[in-house]
Image: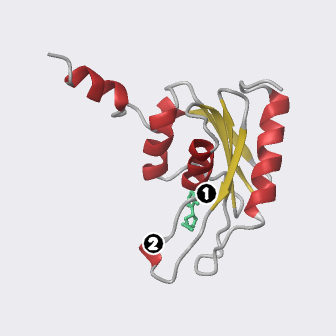
């Protein structure tokens, strides 16, 4: 198994995202999302959106997949696939782009897909240019 963005791994990531998307809890939006991360160490980590009657308490699929990755002991994202509803590939929301930035790199692959079948592959830098990240905090702490 490769940990980069090879075609076979992209298919495996979308397959995992589709499986976990089935378990999404989205009774309010009816917009089910599944996410699958390939960790830099080779691990596969999945998550789905979990909504709440108190709407702002809902969580995103990417957020859940990142939490699963951290819980599994991995800290670097090599690639992530996000599979949403509808006919347009679903890219991560702004907050999730920042969450991916924490554990990814400017070149981290983000594969967006949707139930309709369309796909689009991007890199984090394209979705979150001039990002704030942990490297900037580390530099600011220098004397
Ligand atoms: N959602 C995600 O889980 N990930 C995204 O990238 C976009 C939006 C969820 C949040 C909410 O449960 C539903 O989709 C509609 O916004």
Q: Which mark is residue 30?
A: none
Q: Estimate the x, y position of residue 53 in percent, counting from the top left.
A: 51, 83
User: In the picture, which quadrant includes the N terminus?
Assistant: top right
Task: Write the residue at 80% across / 32% down.
Answer: 9
Task: Write the residue at 83% across / 40% down.
Answer: 12
Residue named by callout 1: 61
Residue 112 in view (yes/no): no
| Residue placed most toward the observer, 81 or 23 | 23
- Residue, far bottom: 53
Q: Is residue 31 left or right of residue 21?
A: left
Question: Disc 1 beta carbon < 8 A from ligand 1?
Answer: yes
Task: Write the residue at 71% across / 24% down.
Answer: 4
Residue named by callout 2: 57
The relative height of residue 113 versus residue 130 in the rendered view (above or below) is below
Q: Is residue 96 left or right of residue 111?
A: left
Q: Is residue 126 left or right of residue 112?
A: left
Q: Secondary structure at mark 1?
A: helix
The relative height of residue 37 versus residue 57 in the rendered view (above or below) is above
Q: CA distance from mark 2 to mark 1?
A: 13 Å
């Amino acid at each position: 198994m490769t940990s980069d963005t090879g075609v076979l791994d992209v298919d495996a990531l979308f397959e995992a995202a589709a499986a976990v998307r089935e378990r999404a809890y989205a009774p309010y939006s009816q917009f089910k999302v599944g996410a699958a991360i390939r960790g830099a160490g080779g691990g596969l980590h999945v998550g789905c959106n979990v909504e709440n009657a108190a709407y702002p308490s809902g969580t995103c699929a990417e957020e859940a997949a990142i939490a699963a990755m951290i819980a599994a002991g991995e800290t670097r994202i090599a690639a992530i696939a996000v599979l949403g509803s509808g006919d347009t590939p679903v890219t991560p929301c702004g907050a999730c782009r920042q969450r991916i930035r924490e554990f990814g790199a400017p070149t981290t692959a983000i594969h967006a897909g949707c139930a309709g079948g369309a796909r689009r592959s991007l890199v984090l830098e394209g979705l979150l240019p001039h990002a704030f990240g942990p490297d900037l905090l580390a530099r600011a702490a220098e004397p």
